[in-house]
Image (spheres, helix red, strand yellow):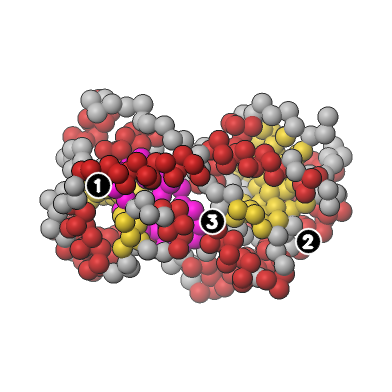
Amino acid sequence: MDIQNIFIVGSKGCGNYGGYETFLDKLTEHHQDNIKIQYYIAWKGREQKEFLYHNAHCFQIKVPDIGSIQAIYYDIAALRYCLKHIKKYHVEHPIIYILACRIGPFARYFQKVIHKLGGQVYLNPDGHEWLRAKWNLLIRKYWKFSEKMMVRYSDLLICDSKNIEKYIQSTYRCYHPQTIHIAYGMDLIESPLNDDSPVLIDWYRKNRLKKKGYYLVVGRFVPENSFSIIIPAFMRSHTKRDLVIITTTNDRFQKELEKDFHYKVDPRIKFVGTVYDQGLLKKIRENAYAYLHGHTVGGTNPSLIEALGSTDLNLLVDVCFNREVGEDNALYWKKDISDLAEMIDRADIMRPEEIRKLGKKAKKRVSEEYTWEKITQQYEELFLSSYSLER
């Protein structure tokens, strides 16, 4: 039997702590009994070892503590492992699937070697990494150059956003990139917790919250997620509900926001840290009065799909990526403090039947376009297609 071997690099591993990590967890879970596909997946770690996960052959790459270039080192080391394995075991027509555009200066070399071995290079370009505020000008220029080189020296680009696909086709049309759109997914199932589950009650008590008594934000605490609009807009609104922010730690950014807006004087604004219990997080989403989504940089955002599948009322910043996913199943605010403040006030007095109608439509959209069953089926069809097996 002809088996398609897929080598995937660029993720920290498989698990629920990141978008790529969740994607690989679901991909291997749904394909673990597929006898036509064999996955090889790089994991980032502190030692060299190999193991099976959902029948995928996982290899851990030891990454030294070398600062901001760790990710580049990791991808290169993982690719070298893949090439060594392909040569040693004479793997036929392998596909090397690279997640994100970190190693552009080396893209031409690796494509050339992979082609000599009868393989192909697939790339997931992610979002606009070069627009993230955390990078200085020099690093942004590197990300943009790296993206350009990786698009140029990849055989197929798998875009999780139609708008990212349009951007690739328009910006790099001189390279005639081959692209396909396969979205990100979610499990459209309710939380296993009930409203009286002790873990939920304890979390509510700890943070002085109650069901439908809060607006919710979930995401990394970085400037491009619009916190500098969401927080002052909420302060300006007249709602008596709380703003619950589930996010990572960023002391420097938090101090900047406090200096600019003095949000600590508003008891409604609550930074509650992170929530890694997925059942609890889903229940928090389900019980939120509304979800505020301020992500502006690239792609189909996992937290947006989760919100549409869990929370009835979703207020999204009006950028093309969010419009693509939310369509007419959400409300949209401009990147403006006054506009969002007014929207929060309007949302606060919406009729319950209006909110339920939006929530029902949002869940229908997720069930039709963004389930892991559909996404993993599309990947299976792609990997087993004649395009994958023939050059």
Marks 3/1: CA–CA distance: 28 Å
Which picture quadrant has residue 364? top left
Question: Which one is closest to the eye, mark 3 or mark 1?
Answer: 1
- The disc placed on residue 109 is 2
Q: Where is residue 154? Give x, y as percent.
A: 72, 59
Residue 167: within the magenta?
no
Q: Earlier in the sequence, mark 3 or mark 1?
A: 3
Q: Which residues are magenta?
A: 292-314
Asked if residue 84 shows in the view, the reply is no
**Residue at point 41% right, 64% down?**
319
Neighbor class of circle 3 (other Cα within 10 Å; few <14, some 14-19, many 20+) is many
Marks 2/3: CA–CA distance: 28 Å
Residue type, numbered disc 3:
Ser
Which picture quadrant has residue 198? top left
- Identify residue for label 1: 354
Neighbor class of circle 1 (other Cα within 10 Å; few <14, some 14-19, many 20+) is few
Residue 306: within the magenta?
yes
- The disc placed on residue 35 is none
Residue type, numbered disc 2:
Tyr
**Residue at point 54% right, 56% down?**
161
- The answer to whether 170 is drawn above or below residue 202 in the figure is below
Q: Where is residue 234? Give x, y as percent.
A: 21, 59
Is the residue under label 1 in contact with that under label 3 (CB below 8 Å)? no
Neighbor class of circle 2 (other Cα within 10 Å; few <14, some 14-19, many 20+) is few
